[in-house]
Image (tube, rainbow, N blue to C red):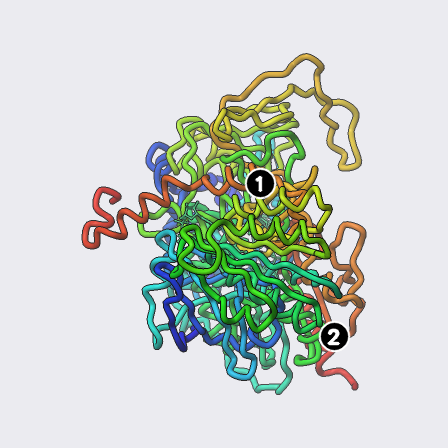
C-alpha cells in the first residue's frame, strides 16, 4: 500500500495553494484551446500535501456525490496515482468533467478546513477540483490500468434517454452491474450540454468523447438521431425495455419578452453555443455558419452567459459585455469563470436590465436598450430583488445580442407520455431515487430539477441506477 | 448510415432520393420532416418527408439544390449513404375531415404538398391541386398528384398547362366557391400571395414555413417565427401554421441572416482545390 511521506500538520500548513497553470489571457482570448493547462505531477503532489486528512472531513459532505476526497488526495500525496484513480472513479463516473466544471467554491472547497481563516490569516482551501482533474486525466491516459472487471450479464435491458451527464453516469453504473444498456440521443453526437453547451476552452470535446468511448467499450449501445416523443414515445420504450431512465435535460430557451427579440443578430445562448460547440462553426472547414459580432451584449450572469461572452470574444468581438440585472456578488456563474472572463477583457454592466433590442433599417441588431436597477427587498431566493430606476434608460451599443437567462422544460417527451406526472413548470416529478409515476420509469438531472449542475445530474444518474438495479432484481 | 436506394432528377435542380430509414418510414405522418446531416463538418438541414414505403423501409426526399449543403447532398449517388437522419420532426398536418381542399405547390414545395394531398384523398376529401413552375421541366409531382384528384398545372411561359402563376388559378377556384381549406407550400412570396388571396374569402389557409433550423426539437430557438402576436418555433409548433397569422416579412428577413456566409460557401465550393486558402 501507499507509503505516506511523513509530514506534520505544521509542514502541511506551510504549503501555499498551488496556482493552476493557464494560458496567458491575451493569447487564450483569441483561441479555443483549454484555458487551464492542468497540474504537473509535482504540483499535484505538493498541493495534495496541503490536505490535513481531517478525521471528519467536511469536504466530503460538501460534495453532492460524496467523493472520498481525503482518500484520493492522500494517495496523490503518496505518489500512488493508480490507487488515487481507482478510488476517485469508484465515487465519480466523470471526474475529468467535474474536476473542470463543478462550482467547487460553493461545494467541496467551500467547507474545506484549510479554507477557514486561522490566526488572522485568510484561509485557502485545498484545490480539490484541480486535483480531481489531475487524477482523472491520469486515469484517462492509462485506461487499461483502471478498467473495471467484466460483469456477469443479467439479461435485463435498460433504456436511457439523453446522453448528458445524468444519462452517461446511469449508463456506466448499469453496464457495470451487467445490464444491457441502450442510450437514445436526439442529436447526432453524445454528451448533452457537455458537448453542445460548455465550450472547448473549458471542457475539451475529446475528453467528453473519451468518456463516451469508455462506455461503448463497456458494451453500452448509443442510438443517435432518436428523439423520444417523436421517433419513439416513452410508453413504447417502456414496453421494449425492462426499465427506463429519462435524463433529457431542460432544453427550451427562455427569451426576454422585449421588443426586437426576433431581429437578426439575436441568439438564444443555446443556439449560439450549439452552432459553435456542436457544429464547429468557428472552424473554417465547417458548413454551419455563426454570426461574428464586433460588439456583443450577453444578457445573464450564469455559466451559460460567461460561456457565450467568452466565445464571442474568441470569435473576434472587440467589445463583449455581460448585462446582468443584479450586482457582482449575486453572479451565479462559477467564480473561476468570472475571473477568467475579466482577465480576457470582458466588460460587465451590473444592475442593468434590457428593455428593448434596437434594430437598424435592415432588420439587424443595432443596440440593446437597458435600464439601470437598484437592489430592493430580498425575494424568494433570498437575493435582493432588482428594481428599475425610472428615467435611467441608456443603450449598450451592440450588433449582436445573446440571451442567456435560463431554460424551461422541453415538452416533446412528456406530451407523448400521458401517465407521466409533471409539475406545473413541466418538469418530471421524481422521488429521491428517481422513481416517477410510471413503474420502471426513472428520471433525473435537469428535467427533474430545472437547470442545475453537472454533478447533481450525475448524482441523480447514480442513485437512479442503484434503484433500477434493485427494481430489476426485485420480486416480480 | 442511411443508404440511398435510388436517385432521380425531377427538374433541372430538383433531385428525388429514396433513402433507407425504416423507423421513420413506419411512423411518419404528412407534414413532418427530417433533419439530415451528410457527415463530419456538414450542416444539419431540414427536409420534408415527401413519401414513405414502410414495407421497404424507405423514405423519399426531394431536394432543391440552392446552396452548399443541398448541392453536396444531390451529388450523392445510389450506393452512397447519408450519415444522419433524425425524425420524424414537426407536427403532422391537421387534415380537413371532409369537403374540398385545394393544395397549392410551387417548385420544390409541390413535393411537400404531395403527402398532404395523398392523406386528404385517402380520408375521402376532394382534392384539387394547383402546381406550378417557370416552365415545363420545372413542374414536378404532377403524375403523383393526379392520383389524389384534379391537377391544374401553371407555368410562367405556358410551356405546360396554363400560362401564369398558381395564384391566378387559385383565385378562380376561390371565386367559384365551395373550397373548405387551402394548403399552400412553396417559395415564401407564393405562400404569402396565397394567404392574401384567400383572406377576403375567409378560407382557412395552411402554409409550411421553412425557417432556419439547427436541432429541430425546440432547443435552440433559432427557427422562431411570428404568428399573430406570438413567437413560435417552426420545428415543434409547426412547420405548418395559419397563413393568415404569419408574419411573412419577418420570415423573409430572417432567412437572409447568413446570406454572406452562404454565397461565400457556394463560391468556394465551385473552386475545388483552393477552398480553404486564406482561412487558415
Ligand atoms: C452553457 C452551459 C454551461 C454550463 N456550465 C456548467 C458548469 O460549469 N458547471 C456545472 O456544474 N453545470 C454547468 N451547466 C449546467 C449543466 O450542464 C447541466 O445541469 C447538466 O448538463 C444537466 O445534465 P442532464 O444529464 O440532466 O442533461 P443534458 O446535459 O441537458 O443532456 C440531455 C441530453 O438529452 C438529449 N435529449 C433531449 N431531449 C431528448 C429527447 N426527447 N429524446 C432523446 N434525447 C433527448 C439532449 O440532446 C442532450 O444530449 C452548464 C449548462 C450550460 C447550458
Ligand atoms: C421544415 C422544412 C422543410 C423543408 N423541406 C425541404 C424539402 O423538402 N426540399 C428542399 O429542397 N428544401 C426544403 N427545405 C429547405 C432546406 O432546408 C434549405 O434549402 C437548405 O437548408 C438550404 O441549405 P444550403 O446550404 O444548400 O443553402 P444555404 O447556403 O443555406 O442557402 C442558400 C439559399 O437558400 C436560402 N435558404 C436557406 N435556408 C433556407 C430554408 N430553410 N428554406 C428556404 N430557403 C433557405 C437562403 O436564404 C439562400 O438564399 C425545408 C426547410 C424546412 C425548415
Ligand atoms: S465531484 Fe465536484 S464537488 Fe465533488 S469533489 Fe469533485 S469537484 Fe468537488
Ligand atoms: S476538509 Fe480539506 S483539509 Fe480536510 S480532508 Fe477535506 S480536503 Fe483535506
Ligand atoms: S430548430 Fe432549434 S428550436 Fe427549432
Q: Position of residue B13 (x, y in %)?
A: 36, 59
Q: Secondary structure at mark 1?
A: helix
Marks 1/2 in contact by CB < 8 Å: the verdict is no
Examine the rendered structure and indicate whether residue A306 appears above or below residue A48.
Answer: above
| Host chain of mark 2 | A
Q: Which of the two marks, 1 or 2, is nearer to us in this view?
A: 1
Residue A116, image quadrant? top right
Q: Position of residue B69 (x, y in %)?
A: 38, 56
Mark linked to residue B248: 1
Q: Position of residue A40 (x, y in %)?
A: 36, 51
Q: Position of residue A276 (x, y in %)?
A: 44, 47
Left or right, residue B205 beside residue A289: right
Q: Which residue is mark 2?
A: A440
Examine the rendered structure and indicate whether residue B60 appears above or below residue A351.
Answer: below
Tell me the CA gap for discs 1 and 2: 47 Å
Q: Is residue A186 visible?
A: no
**Mark 1 neighbour density, 10 Å: few (under 14) some (14–19) many (20 or more):** some
- Quarter of the image for the N terminus of chain B: give it: bottom left
- Does mark 2 fall on the same chain as mark 1? no
Residue drawn at (45%, 71%), measured in percent from left and top? A146
Left or right, residue A315 beside residue A333: left
Q: Is residue B84 visible?
A: yes
Mark linked to residue A10: none
Q: Is mark 2 within 8 Å of ligand 1?
A: no
Of B252 and B25, nearer the camera is B252
Examine the rendered structure and indicate whether residue A226 appears above or below residue B163.
Answer: below
| Host chain of mark 1 | B
Residue drawn at (49%, 35%), measured in percent from left and top? A265
Of A388 and A329, nearer the camera is A388
Amino acid at each position: 500500500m501507499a507509503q505516506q511521506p511523513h509530514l506534520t500538520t505544521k509542514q502541511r500548513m506551510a504549503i501555499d495553494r498551488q496556482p493552476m497553470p493557464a494560458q496567458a489571457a491575451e493569447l487564450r482570448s483569441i483561441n479555443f484551446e483549454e484555458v487551464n493547462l492542468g497540474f504537473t505531477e509535482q504540483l499535484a503532489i505538493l498541493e495534495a500535501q496541503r490536505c490535513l486528512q481531517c478525521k471528519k472531513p467536511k469536504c466530503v459532505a460538501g460534495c453532492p456525490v460524496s467523493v472520498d476526497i481525503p482518500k484520493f488526495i492522500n494517495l496523490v500525496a503518496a505518489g500512488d496515482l493508480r490507487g488515487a484513480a481507482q478510488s476517485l472513479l469508484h465515487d465519480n463516473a466523470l471526474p475529468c468533467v467535474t474536476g473542470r466544471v463543478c462550482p467547487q467554491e460553493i461545494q467541496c472547497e467551500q467547507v474545506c478546513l484549510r479554507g477557514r481563516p486561522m490566526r488572522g490569516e485568510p484561509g485557502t482551501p485545498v484545490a480539490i477540483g484541480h486535483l480531481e482533474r489531475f487524477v482523472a486525466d491520469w486515469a484517462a491516459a492509462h485506461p487499461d490500468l483502471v478498467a473495471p472487471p467484466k460483469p456477469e450479464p443479467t439479461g435485463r435491458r435498460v433504456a436511457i434517454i439523453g446522453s448528458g451527464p445524468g444519462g452517461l453516469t446511469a449508463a456506466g453504473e448499469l453496464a457495470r452491474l451487467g445490464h444491457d444498456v441502450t442510450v437514445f440521443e436526439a442529436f447526432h453526437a453524445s454528451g448533452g450540454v457537455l458537448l453542445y453547451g460548455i465550450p472547448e476552452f473549458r471542457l475539451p470535446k475529446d475528453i467528453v468523447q473519451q468518456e463516451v468511448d469508455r462506455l461503448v467499450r463497456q458494451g453500452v449501445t448509443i442510438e443517435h438521431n432518436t428523439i423520444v416523443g417523436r421517433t419513439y414515445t416513452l410508453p413504447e420504450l417502456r414496453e421494449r425495455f425492462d426499465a427506463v431512465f429519462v435524463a433529457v435535460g431542460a432544453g427550451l430557451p427562455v427569451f426576454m419578452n422585449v421588443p426586437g427579440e426576433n431581429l437578426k443578430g439575436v441568439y438564444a445562448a443555446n443556439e449560439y453555443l450549439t452552432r459553435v460547440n456542436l457544429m464547429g462553426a468557428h472552424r473554417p472547414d465547417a458548413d454551419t455558419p455563426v454570426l461574428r459580432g464586433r460588439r456583443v451584449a450577453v444578457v445573464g450572469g450564469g455559466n451559460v452567459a460567461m460561456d457565450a461572452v467568452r466565445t464571442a470574444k474568441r470569435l473576434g468581438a472587440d467589445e463583449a459585455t455581460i448585462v446582468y440585472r443584479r450586482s457582482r456578488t449575486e453572479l451565479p456563474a462559477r467564480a473561476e469563470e468570472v475571473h477568467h472572463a475579466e482577465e480576457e477583457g470582458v466588460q460587465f454592466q451590473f444592475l442593468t436590465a434590457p428593455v428593448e433590442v434596437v434594430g437598424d433599417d435592415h432588420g439587424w441588431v443595432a443596440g440593446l436598450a437597458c435600464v439601470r436597477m437598484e437592489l430592493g427587498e430580498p425575494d424568494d431566493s433570498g437575493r435582493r430583488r432588482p428594481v428599475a430606476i425610472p428615467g435611467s434608460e441608456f443603450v449598450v451599443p451592440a450588433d449582436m445580442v445573446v440571451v442567456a437567462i435560463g431554460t424551461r422544460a422541453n415538452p416533446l417527451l412528456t406530451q407523448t407520455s400521458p401517465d407521466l406526472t409533471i409539475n406545473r413548470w413541466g418538469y418530471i416529478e421524481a422521488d429521491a431515487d428517481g422513481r416517477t409515476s410510471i413503474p420502471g420509469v426513472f428520471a433525473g438531472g435537469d428535467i427533474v430539477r430545472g437547470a442545475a449542475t453537472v454533478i447533481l445530474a450525475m448524482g441523480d444518474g447514480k442513485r437512479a441506477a442503484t434503484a433500477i438495479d434493485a427494481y430489476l432484481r426485485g420480486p416480480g | 448510415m442511411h443508404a440511398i436506394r435510388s436517385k432521380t432528377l425531377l427538374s433541372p435542380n430538383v433531385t428525388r432520393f429514396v433513402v433507407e430509414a425504416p423507423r421513420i418510414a413506419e411512423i411518419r405522418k404528412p407534414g413532418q420532416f427530417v433533419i439530415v446531416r451528410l457527415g463530419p463538418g456538414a450542416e444539419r438541414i431540414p427536409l420534408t418527408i415527401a413519401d414513405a414505403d414502410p414495407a421497404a423501409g424507405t423514405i423519399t426526399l426531394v431536394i432543391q439544390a440552392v446552396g452548399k449543403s443541398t448541392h453536396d447532398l444531390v451529388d450523392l449517388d445510389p450506393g452512397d449513404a447519408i450519415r444522419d437522419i433524425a425524425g420524424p420532426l414537426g407536427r403532422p398536418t391537421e387534415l380537413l375531415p371532409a369537403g374540398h381542399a385545394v393544395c397549392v405547390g410551387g417548385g420544390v414545395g409541390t413535393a411537400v404538398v404531395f403527402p398532404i394531398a395523398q392523406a386528404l384523398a385517402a380520408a375521402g376529401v376532394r382534392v384539387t391541386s394547383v402546381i406550378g413552375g417557370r416552365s415545363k421541366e420545372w413542374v414536378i409531382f404532377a403524375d403523383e398528384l393526379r392520383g389524389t384528384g384534379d391537377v391544374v398545372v401553371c407555368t410562367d411561359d405556358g410551356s405546360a398547362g396554363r400560362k401564369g402563376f398558381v395564384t391566378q388559378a387559385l383565385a378562380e377556384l376561390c371565386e367559384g366557391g365551395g373550397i373548405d381549406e387551402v394548403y399552400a407550400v412553396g417559395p415564401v412570396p407564393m405562400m404569402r400571395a396565397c394567404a392574401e388571396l384567400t383572406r377576403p374569402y375567409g378560407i382557412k389557409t395552411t402554409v409550411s414555413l421553412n425557417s432556419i433550423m439547427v436541432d429541430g426539437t425546440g432547443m435552440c430557438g433559432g427557427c422562431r417565427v411570428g404568428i399573430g402576436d406570438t413567437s413560435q418555433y417552426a420545428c415543434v409548433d409547426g412547420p405548418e401554421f395559419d397563413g393568415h397569422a404569419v408574419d411573412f416579412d419577418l420570415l423573409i428577413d430572417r432567412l437572409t441572416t447568413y446570406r454572406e456566409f452562404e454565397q461565400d460557401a457556394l463560391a468556394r465550393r465551385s473552386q475545388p482545390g483552393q477552398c480553404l486558402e486564406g482561412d487558415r
